[in-house]
Amino acid sequence: MKVYPGSEIKQLTDVQKKQAVRSTQETGKAQEGDKVDFSSTLQQIQDQGGDLRSDPVRQARVQAVKEQIADGDYRPDSLKVAASLLKYFGKGDS
């Protein structure tokens, strides 16, 4: 059997992954370190926006964009996108 440099670490990592999966399967719960956190920005958007899916104007705009994308006709204005990103990150005046 040949031993290659670094293979011990990979084997150890593989064993640890298998043990974690087995533990999760047995208990039905993920290990303590597994969790999902949403950014504060996302949380603020959710708090302020409410349910945007119920807005009929927004639904119509989203549907129009979906159709343009499906047809291959969607051409976003790159200057508007860039200006919006700069404004969002607080570096633009517009």
Image: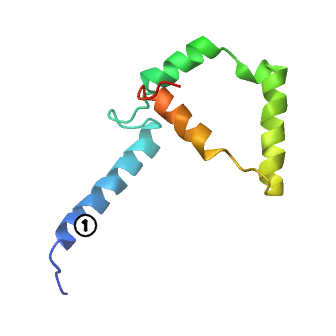
The residue under label 1 is 11
Number of numbered callouts drawn: 1
Q: Quadrant of residue 45?
A: top right
Outermost bottom residue? 1
Query: In the rendering, at what x and y percent does residue 23 appear?
Result: 38, 44
Determine the residue positioned at 78% across, 42% down: 65
Determine the residue positioned at 85% across, 30% down: 60
Query: In the rendering, at what x and y percent does residue 88 appear?
Result: 49, 27
Q: Is residue 29 above or below residue 77?
A: above
Q: Which of 37 and 3 is in front in this view?
A: 37
Outermost front residue? 93
| Badge 1 element | helix
Q: In this view, does 35 lie above or below 7?
A: above
In the picture, measured across the screen, residue 55 lies left or right of residue 38, that is: right
Q: Nearer the viewer, residue 54 or 12?
A: 54
Q: Which colour scheme is used?
A: rainbow
Q: Nearer the viewer, residue 6 or 46?
A: 46
Query: In the rendering, at what x and y percent does residue 57 appear?
Result: 83, 23
In the picture, measured across the screen, residue 76 lies left or right of residue 68, that is: left
- Looking at the figure, which quarter contains the N terminus? bottom left
Residue type beneath disc 1? Gln
In the picture, measured across the screen, residue 25 lies left or right of residue 17, that is: right
Q: In this view, does 44 lie above or below 29?
A: above
Query: In the rendering, at what x and y percent does residue 31 appear?
Result: 36, 37
